[in-house]
Image (spheres, rainbow, N blue to C red):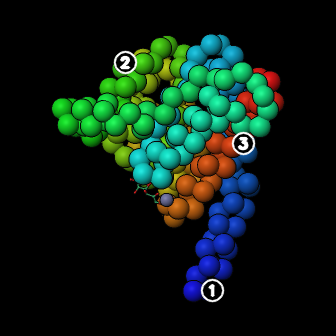
Amino acid sequence: MKQTIKNEFLSHLEVINLTIETMQDKLEQASLLVVETLKNGNKILLCGNGGSAADAQHIAAELVGRYKSDRRGLPAIALTTDTSILTSVGNDYGYEKIFDRQVEALANKGDLIIGISTSGNSKNIVNVLKLGRELDCKTVGFSGYKGGIMNEFCDINLIVPSNNTPRIQEMHILFGHIICQIVDDELS
Ligand SMILES: O=C(CO)[C@@H](O)[C@H](O)[C@H](O)[C@H](O)COP(=O)(O)O
Ligand SMILES: [Zn+2]
């Protein structure tokens, strides 16, 4: 058991070291896009499945509530939280549509959609990014592996250099926190 614990810590360290080396510029670009979207009076819409649904909610909460500084509340919506919408749209139109139906209903031109998928291939995430493009929204992906099908529909795809889903998720929430820190710095 001790060996498992050590191995998990070490594999996290390995991924974080690779991520620091390779991803700082893209993370800066994504942060600037979030700041610009909010400064323009647009909103951030976030979605993901499983652990990534929790990440979407976590990041939306930092923006609507607060991260560290006492700035005003910022417009962000996690599309993963309304069980009546998720079950009715899933039941009537299919699970692949649960996010893009909400974007169709809520998004305006210039809003930013953040799709979180470690594989980059979850159909509901690919669909929502594709629709976002069609509606003149900005699109950012948080992914891993090689970015998957999402690559095609993202203005910026933050691809964690790993094939290990939990390790990728650990980098995603760090990306979320880094972006929130930059939002605090720029909008406080
Ligand atoms: O949290 C985890 C694994 O760490 C799982 O709940 C994971 O998020 C789910 O299997 C997702 O359905 C994976 O989808 P994706 O990241 O490939 O889009
Ligand atoms: Zn997980």
Crowdedness near tag 3: few (<14), some (14–19) or many (≥20) residues, C-alpha within 10 Å: some
* Relative image position of residue 65 (x, y in whole percent): 65, 31
75, above or below 154, in the image: above
Label 2 neighbourhood size at 10 Å, few (<14), some (14-19), many (20+)? few
Write the residue at 68% across / 55% down: 19
Residue type at mark 2? Ala
Q: Are discs 2 and 3 less than 8 Å apart at CB?
A: no
Q: CA distance from mark 2 to mark 1?
A: 50 Å
CA neighbours of label 1 inside 10 A, class few (<14), some (14 to 19), many (20+)? few
Q: Secondary structure at mark 1?
A: helix
Distance between mark 3 and mark 1 Cα atoms: 31 Å
Name the N-terminal-most of marks 3 and 1: 1
Q: Are marks 2 and 1 in contact (CB under 8 Å)?
A: no
Instruction: Report the residue marked by disc 2.
Output: 105
Residue for point 57% across, 42% down: 58
In the picture, the disc for residue 178 is 3
Query: At x 61% / y 49%, what residue is drawn?
Result: 173
- Sequence-first disc among 2 and 3: 2
Quadrant in the picture for residue 101: top left
Q: Quadrant of residue 6?
A: bottom right
Residue occupying image coordinates x 72% and y 42%: 178
The location of residue 54, given as percent across then percent down, is 50, 47
Circles 3 and 1: CB atoms closer than 8 Å:
no
Image quarter of the N terminus: bottom right
Secondary structure type for disc 3: helix
Query: Quick check: 100 left or right of 183?
Result: left
The residue to which callout 1 is attached is: 2
The residue type indicated by label 3 comes to: Ile
